[in-house]
Amino acid sequence: MSVDIPLDQDPGQDSGQGPSPSRALAPPGRSLIDRVEGITTARFFLIALVVFVVISLRVYWPQLPGNPHSIVGCACGDEMQEVWFLKWTPWAILHGHNPFFTNWMDYPSGANLATNTVMPALAILVAPVTWLFGAISSYNLLMWASFPVSALACCFVVRRVTASNLAALVAGALYGFSPYMVGQGVAHVFLIFAPLPPLIFYALFRIVVVQEGSARRWGLVLAVLVIVQFFISQEVAADTVIVAAIALVILILANRGALTRRRVDYALRAGLYSVVIAFVVLAYPVYFQLLGPQAIHGATHGTTHSPLKLDVLGTIVPNSLQWWSPSFLSRLGNKFMGGDLGENGSYLGAPLVAVLGLILWKMRANRWVLYVNGVLLATEILSMGRWLMVANHTIHVPLPWTAFGKISFLQSDLPNRFALFASFFVAVLVALGITRWRDWSRQPVPSRPRVPRVALHGGLSVLAVASFALYLPRLPIITSPVPVVPAFFTSPLDLQIPAGSVVLPFPISASPHATSMLWQVRAGFRWKMIGGEAIIPTPRDHVTGQPASTRPVQVTQFLSYWSGANTRDPTLDDALVARMREFVFLNDVGTVVLDPTTPHASQAFTLFRDALGAPTSEGGLDVWFHAQRLARAVAATPQG
């Protein structure tokens, strides 16, 4: 189907129907909708911000933004890793370290943070909060702020495009509180802090369609937005570029006969500024990600055949994260995405799908509606991954992601994350539908209507309420108390550990358990650490979130196993004790610390005592200072 989209046509305007009434203020006092539409732009955005902030307070209730005493999700896994990253970036910059690499965890090999989700832009943004109140507070604040900020960005874009306050408010809510946002809001701040994708699409709209003002200025704006998004989430940045490229190709093909020399020159000038500036700024981090130490070649999740992809039924079958999720449906919905509820952000609900179909049918004369629907369809297809999935059954029909998955730097990209963009285009379509509904309601009533207007308004209102009700997520999202950090790390006792020396903690941080990462954060990175929650390559060029490659591996496996990780359990015998002493020397361990209140601490205590002798007890911990000296002394002592 050929879709001709006049580049100078307002997206809210039906082709051939004259100027859109959305460009003029409606007469005041006619209705509540007219009063909403008559609010000035500045006042409207202030009201929208207040509305989104109030709604956002419910997301993690009763936890308030920036609470340092509890944490979204748990103090483990990805959550603790992101807390560590928020602390690391400003600390590394102030102390002259490379923010894209660290051996302060996973010592001695270290981790390539450019390959991981280090999100330096967010870390710098909240650095003052981190210094004043701690990284837990920064993490919680960012998780909460992601909802209203993302919603407001979408609201701004839609308001600029449609000139409708009501449409913009609804679109912002659909995007900022979508199932994708709520699902990822359990653990992934770098994925839900998403105000920039709508702004990037808007900048492209200004460059390709509107073309008013300086091409250089809009090229600079686009470059800055892409660069900042890269430093928030490389995955979202890459997905944004993919979707933008597809949208641009569709637009060019649909308007190939209307591309004048002037339009092409304007777009090329703006694009050149964007590409050059982005290349200069991003060249080093991209190089470091691909070719730096501990770089990962291949899929960071261990496979390019991830279960995290859209099931065809995922848009209409809810899971347990939705407010309305009857058991006969959620039993199926909970199995989507390999059973990972937080990753299933594709849900829309049958009424909202019906609304989108109705908008497409009634506004089929509006070329922009057809265009946005085409981009939405392309985004949904991308989110399905390599093969078609229906009711958790793989149907071997190859999909476009098969080609994308062969590109090396996209092998770590997860198809389900395109749900973010699907929610944006759904919001835009709904906004266009609302403007059409509003304009239709202002038209004179025919003398003999086929269907009474009251009945039509009633039916549309019922459909709108049903769409809203089934789209609602189940709130609040779970939060957990922050574990108590031993007094050793919150008092001058910690100063007994030489600055910059290596500490072997127990429990060792091995995915998903990350207690010692919290200790290191609270200690202000005084010392380096064996273990840590980061994706690192193995000697065989696979990937792992475990410190399993730290030699001797038998010791690492033993400590990881009793710390709660899924590793082998080597037998605790004289050979393992000897390897424990070898471990201390091979990895420059200066201090060993053990929390005796941890489950299975007795296993590690026996190993440490047999290898290093009796510990000292300070600040709630068993501590072996000068571990190498202790190891030599015990080894030199005759046994028996």
Image: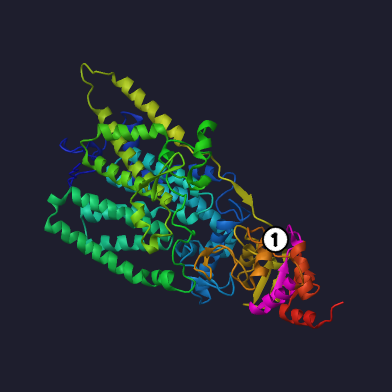
**Quarter location, residue 628:** bottom right
Residue 1 spot, x, y in % from top left: 20, 41
The colour mode here is rainbow
586 in the magenta segment: yes
228 in the magenta segment: no
Residue 335 spot, x, y in % from top left: 51, 42
Q: Which residues are magenta?
A: 575-601
| 221 vs 480, nearest the viewer | 480
The residue at 33%/24% (across/down) is 457
- In the figure, is residue 588 to the left or right of 386? right
Residue 290 spot, x, y in % from top left: 41, 69
- In the figure, is residue 237 to the left or right of 98? left
| 549 vs 180, nearest the viewer | 549
Q: What secondary structure is marked by label 1?
A: helix
| 136 vs 35, nearest the viewer | 136
- Residue at image mark 1: 562
Above/below status of 360 relative to 184: above
**Quarter location, residue 37:** top left
